[in-house]
Amino acid sequence: MSKFKLLLKKFRSRWHGVSTCPKETLVASLSVTYLARCGHKTKLREEIGPKDDRREITLLLTENRPDFCLSCLESAIIRCAWCGQTIWPDNPITLYETSQKDFQPKDGSRLYSEKDGYKTYVGCLRWNCADTLADRAGFWRMPGFVERQMSPIEQCLNTGEMVVVEDIKE
């Protein structure tokens, strides 16, 4: 028997049954209820989100438990104060201060800070909303807070040097 045929036989025997097992195993594991670290019981997969942006989410297990349940994840979804689009946990965000004291943000948006009557709101980083991609000020994180990072513009002002941004999502 040739070396190739031996390798092929070994490979087939090692992976025998893999094509039939995972489908049933996966379906069974998705219907089981898990106790998440947030303290709530949850399934691993479900469609969540607002009506205009529903997504099927599959939670990952760390040490046989998800970190958050699907309802906590859904309650952490917010809206951009300017365009009203959804901001999901781990999305990059902007922090813009309002130029008018009577500014009315979109429903479901989050206030980041308020100073001298001017408010700073959490916004999205979509092309039609953010002034520039260099305005990325952090990320929206679970269970619903801003993980603040220096924007590329702030980095330039702080160091006095050019800043190269390879990926705005990291």
Image (tube, rainbow, N blue to C red):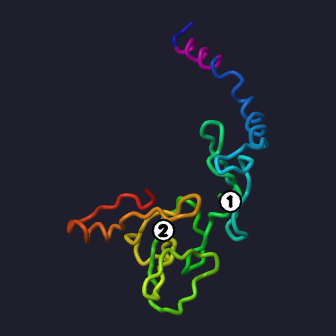
The type of residue carrying mark 1 is Arg
**First to last magenta residue range:** 4-13
Task: Give me the C-alpha separation between circle 2 and circle 1.
Answer: 20 Å
Badge 2 or badge 1: first in the primary sequence: 1
Residue lying at 42% horizontally and 68% vertically, measured from the top left: 136
Indicate the quadrant containing the C terminus: top left, top right, bottom left or bottom right: bottom left
Report the residue marked by disc 1.
Answer: 55
The type of residue carrying mark 2 is Ile
Report the residue marked by disc 2.
Answer: 93
Residue lying at 59% horizontally and 59% vertically, measured from the top left: 143
Q: Position of residue 94 (x, y in %)?
A: 46, 72
- Where disc 2 sits, the SS reads strand
Q: Quadrant of residue 158?
A: bottom left
Q: Position of residue 28 (x, y in %)?
A: 78, 37
Q: Quadrant of residue 106?
A: bottom right
Q: Is residue 7 magenta?
A: yes
Residue lying at 75% horizontally and 38% vertically, measured from the top left: 29
Circles 2 and 1: CB atoms closer than 8 Å: no
